[in-house]
Amino acid sequence: MAAGIDDIAVYIPRLYVDASDFAHARGMDPAKLEKGLGVSKMAMVDTNQDPACLAANACLKIMQKNKLSPESIGRLYVSTESAFDESKAMNSYVIGMLEQVYGSSSFEHCGGVETKFACVSGSYALYDNTNWIRAGEAEGKNALVVVSDIAKYDLGSSGEATQGAGAIAMLLNDKPRLLAFDPKVTATSIKDDYDFYRPFGKETPIVHGQYSNLLYLIQVRKALEAWKNKVISSGLLEIGKDETILDYIDYFNMHLPYANMGKKALAYLIRHEWRSLPRWKPLIDKIGMAEPQPKDPRGTIESVLGDQEFMEKDHEFTKRFTNTEEFQEVYESKLASSLIASKMIGNLYTASLYLGFRSSLEFEYQKGVDLAGKRIGFGSYGSGASAMVFSGVIQPEYESVVKDMNIEAEIGTRKKLSLEEYEKIHENKLTIDQSLLSPKKEFVLVEIQTKPEYRGERRYSFNE
Ligand code: COA
């Protein structure tokens, strides 16, 4: 049975920080954000928004667009790493908000949980719900998987330039118009590590940025190896002599903590795949330097990062490699479109990979490419750490959904924050009722109880 993504809705808060304003305020070269990281705007939540209401707004959009009734939804999962309760699941808040519109108890039959594993949990939720459909347990109903996050780092930290916020709702069913997942090839890798984590009660994460960049690459590569083995042993794809399985992927979608991380990841994976192929030798001649080796090739991530001579040479090698026309051809035709929305919006943690997917559909379609039958490869990564590599094929009906995609229109009119406004919001200096915008037809947070017996209870309303 086919199963996959039928439609996608995006909800992005309409406040943003401009990368160049941010860079000037922090004494940074704006080119580091624009060119080095690939960040031009970072979406920010208003004082009356939390990850649950972002998720509910994305759900409402997808339900209204597809005229879905609550009865047609069998499962509603929310994946997030911005949880504000250690016990009550975020999907329950979302159900509460949706019932304000669809009627009390209208979602009573609907199952679901909140899932957590940094930025990768949405991919696990998609996989589990796809299997619920494949197993015939859905009995014709749809699943909604919502990925929702507020990517918030400490003021003045190196991560501060890679913030963002938003939610993406994905409608899954057995007749997906957009993408059917390839069965029995989804692959994972997992490791107990501390590249990025957020201990109980802390609002922002503890981050070892360069360590997490490298761990991301290593884990995704391991999952890619496992995916390749499954693809070949299952007979899903047959590769010819002197080819790599990546030649058979039409589009790559990578986890995007910032847009340029997608390019870094693609370069890393391609480099490892091409190294054993005849195409590598002429490329090395063109690059004009041998591939550098760390002093201790079997060393730890720390030893590799601490090997300054290697890091510098590897940086130079990567720069030359990514400038070759061979890499550029792959980058432009298979990845670049997925990075456009990330540059406009910033980091969405769990939702970043799916914003990339949504972006590649819109911008590849605009180029006039016929997307039917194209195979998409996904590289999902969550700190802590786990990676998931999986794939799917664009369905013949895709055009009926993709032709109306317009990310700018979907976000709506945005308000640029001054650095003073941004810092006040960031440091929680404004109260819920001091919101900067007055949204219409959206869920907003109106109260968080402080009395000891009700502490933490949240109330939301739908603004008509
Ligand atoms: N003009 C153009 N590019 C510039 C530049 C300038 N003036 N200054 C720096 N750059 C480039 C760097 O060369 C680098 O690009 P490269 O990686 O292709 O070489 C990029 O901008 C980032 O610079 P870097 O010095 O590595 O930034 P940083 O050390 O301040 O931090 C992160 C980068 C990503 C580590 C940091 O933002 C972070 O900790 N983010 C949160 C964690 C995260 O996202 N992890 C990813 C895995 S989930």
Image (cartoon, rainbow, N blue to C red):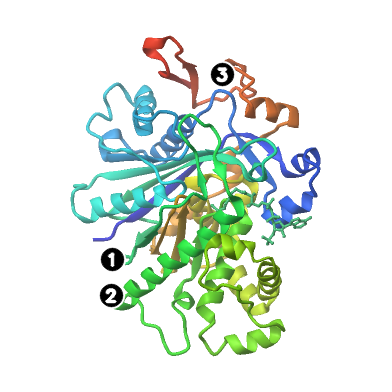
Q: Amino acid at mark 3?
A: Ile
Residue 295 in the figure: left or right of residue 29: left
Q: Looking at this view, is 365 or 400 the one in front?
A: 365
Q: What residue sits right under mark 2 in the picture?
A: 234
Q: Amino acid at mark 1?
A: Lys
Residue 397 in the figure: left or right of residue 128: right
Q: What residue sits right under mark 3 in the picture?
A: 432
Query: Is disc 3 surrounded by few (<14), some (14 to 19) or many (20+) residues within 10 Å?
Result: some
Q: Which quadrant of the view contains residue 187?
A: bottom left
In the picture, the disc for residue 184 is: 1
- Residue at image coords 46%, 63%: 220
Q: Position of residue 258 (x, y in %)?
A: 61, 52
Q: Earlier in the sequence, mark 3 or mark 1?
A: 1
Q: Secondary structure at mark 2?
A: helix
Pointers 2 and 1 in contact (C-beta within 8 Å): yes
Q: Looking at this view, is 174 or 167 the one in front?
A: 167
